[in-house]
Image (tube, rainbow, N blue to C red):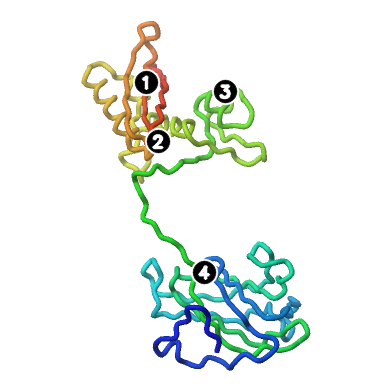
Amino acid sequence: MVMGTGAWGDGSWGAGSWGGGVGIGFQFLDAIAIRENALRVEFSAAVYFSSLLDPGDASVVTNWSITANHDSVGLNGDNARDVNVILVTQSTVDDGVALSDTARFLILTLDRPFTAWPAQYGVTWSGIFSDDLTVSSSGTFFFNATYRQLEAPQIQVPSPSRDMANPQTLSAAQSSLPQPVGPYVLGAFGVDHSGDYATDEGDVNLKKRILRRLMTRKGAFAHLPNYGVGVPDEVKKLGTAATISRLRADAEAQISQEPDVQQVRVVLVIDSATPDLVRLRVAVKTKLGKPVAFDAAFSRQAA
């Protein structure tokens, strides 16, 4: 039995005798969890790895097993979960191994992530040969899972928002897509320079989300019964000051629910020169302190 750094040792789990000792010559040296679902194992010499599933081929997953110490607990408060080896590959320099040593290292890929550090596991091997067909004695090596710092979400810190580009204004289309385009693309999904769907973020993304809230009729989404203002319907019945005040208040309440909005003010303007149009002047201060302002025009004509 081989004990790794920080091996369990205490209690009946660490004191047991798993497998035999490691022989002289071709030896198992170390095991490190390099990703949440990957373990890097090291031998003293190049490992026989034919990928033909013949005797001694290290790629045979049944030559490997990983056992969880269910009494150990990770940072997230969970006991160590069981994991299984589903793939064995030779290491590369991307796994933190020098090019001259990649033949000595193997990567065991698992069917699910380890429980976070300091959850404890043991890797058992058998029937592993070196490149010159020297057999390694079977055994078990104990190790800790990967360290992952867990942080509670902070609502005070705004998270950048990114969405598929679906421009609602010509200025948005020209700023979110790789090349200036005409108004025929409004409401459509654009593409970027690679041919994939384009994305937008920042001011363009925020304006689009605000317009979506203003235009959506309240209750249009069954799973979001309080989402939306329904401005296109409301502007057809702006007959009293109370109705105008209610529409402004509803718009401000809706826009303030966007996660990156700190303050918002909405002013409703009816221009005597264009009485068939109602403009909502939206002024927003984001949580990053940046002001964003724009006008949204809506027709008062019956649809």
Choose the circle earlier in sequence order: 2 or 3: 3
Cα gap from disc 2 to disc 4, whole angstroms: 38 Å
Quadrant, the N terminus: bottom right
Q: Mark 3 or mark 4: which comes first in sequence? A: 4
- For disc 4, the marked residue is 112
Q: Amino acid at mark 3?
A: Pro
Q: Are marks 4 and 1 in contact (CB under 8 Å)?
A: no
Picture residue at 32% right of the left edge, 31% below the top: 263
Which is more foreground, mark 3 or mark 4? Answer: 4
Pointer 3: what residue?
183
**At which x and y percent is residue 31?**
58, 76
Three-letter amino acid code of the residue under disc 1: Arg
Nearer the observer, 214 or 124: 124
Q: Out of 60 and 9, give the one closest to the viewer.
A: 9
The first of marks 3 and 1 along the sequence is 3
**For discs 2 and 4, the disc positioned in front in the rendered view:** 2
Circle 1 residue: 281
Tell which circle, 2 or 1, labels the residue nearer the N-terminal end. 1
Q: Disc 4 residue type?
A: Arg
Residue 288: assigned label: 2
Instruction: Between residue 258 and residue 24, name the one nearer to us.
Output: 24
